[in-house]
Image: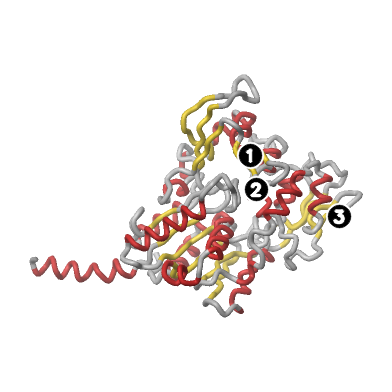
Amino acid sequence: MAQWALLLLLQLVPIISALTPIVIIPGDGSNQLEAKLDKATAPAFYCSKKDDWYRLWLKTVDLIASTTCWCDNIRLVVNETTGFASNVPGVQTRAPYWGSTEGFEELDPSIPGHATAAFRNMVIALENAGYKKNVTLRGAPYDFRYTPDSREISYMSDLKALIEATVSENGGAKITIITHSMGGLHGLYFLRQQTTEWKNQHVAKFVPISAPWVGAAKEARLFATGDNEGIPGVSASKIRDEQRSYETNHWLYPAPKSPVWADQVLVTTPTANYTASDTDSFFQAINYPVGSIVHKRVAELLPHPETGPGVEAVCLYSSGVDTIVSFNYTDGNFDKTPKSTLGDGDGTVNLRSLRVCDGWNSTQDAEASIQTFSKISHSDMIMDMKVINAVLEILGLPAQ
């Protein structure tokens, strides 16, 4: 080997070895979802009953122009005995680009200007730092409608296999798991299912960003009225039943057993107040009795999130953004938009839920630390360069 080539190789070795491989788990609705249709019926004559694989989420034009069709294809059917859900008969779904970040860099690539970008900025920064997609930088997208114990998906076993393969393909280098929003719940749930020996062998760090550890108050409005997430032309009440069918929306509801919520009233009407502990009566009031069956199961998935994941962790979150803490339906009509009371948080998740990971500092099983930010919104936490540079620093890399 020529001397210059040997010198170049020796210079590259420390750069390559310094990069801990990464697996990213995105948040709720933060990766693409595809569907294939072979349905016997459709809700309207203009809705397709047969279609090959296409992007179901997010295809903005379908959501706005054909909301009825879109809702029927993406909604779940809940078993009223078990509380588990499944796709509508004749609908198959999948999260595309398994192992890659492509499916969550932006949700609808047809929208110009990267208006639906999610992890795009962070992926670009990681690539600039030397990471290589599908080698040292991997992605774990999922069907965000289902909780990780669902009988319809194999996400937990698939994630474990992806991590093991990534570690093996990178010479045994342990991975860092980076998550956003509900991805943090999936990450914590996953890590709790693994043995200490497995975690010691495969995981270097857990870096959850903006995780709703014990839920967010805004979910109360979603169940009662629907939540169009600010998408113009989409009626909240028209998508309410579809949103109610998702198992994960129960996972994001304020945890009834968490002292964080205590006696906080989430919903007020002229005749009743509903706290996180009043889910049964709340679901009855909004004419959603099956919700109680689903909620009892889902609420037990992640007990005591304040105890941490059992690996080294750095928890990132923001505050100082007005965040809904309760709703008032002044005339008791859940079809109408309620008045909101605001508190502290990141605009989506309440500070009281975000800061549950502060308690990880007191656990003895692994080192944990907290990094906080001011006035960065929930979605911007994976796009803002201050946060991205903090992630780079955690990885031992220079800021950009």
For this rendering, which residue is in front, 50 or 32? Answer: 50
Q: What residue type is labelled 2?
A: Glu
The tag on residue 365 is: none
Residue located beneath label 1 in the image:
76
Residue 1 is drawn in which quadrant?
Answer: bottom left
Tell which tag, 2 or 3, sits nearer the viewer. 2
Q: Earlier in the sequence, mark 2 or mark 3?
A: 2
Say few, some or many: other residues with alpha carbon within 10 Å of mark 3 (under 14 / 14 to 19 / 20 or more): some
Q: Quarter holding the C terminus?
A: bottom left
- Give how far apart the Cα atoms at labels 3 and 1 are: 29 Å
Q: Earlier in the sequence, mark 2 or mark 1?
A: 1
> Are the residues tagged 2 and 1 within 8 Å (C-beta)?
yes
The vertical placement of 372 against 342, above or below, is below
| Residue sticking out furthest to the left | 2
The residue shown at (54%, 32%) is 61
Q: Position of residue 19 (x, y in %)?
A: 35, 67
Q: Which amino acid does label 3 sit on?
A: Asn
> Are the residues tagged 3 and 1 within 8 Å (C-beta)?
no
The vertical placement of 364 against 60, above or below, is below
The tag on residue 247 is: 2
148 sits left or right of 22 in the view? right
The vertical placement of 375 against 114, above or below, is below
318 sits left or right of 105 in the view? right
Residue located beneath label 3 in the image:
273
Q: Which amino acid does label 1 sit on?
A: Leu
The residue shown at (59%, 77%) is 361
Q: Where is residue 70 in the image (x, y as percent from the top left)?
A: 60, 32
Q: How is the image coloured?
A: secondary structure
The residue shown at (75%, 60%) is 256
The residue shown at (71%, 58%) is 254
Q: Is mark 1 on a helix, strand or loop?
A: strand
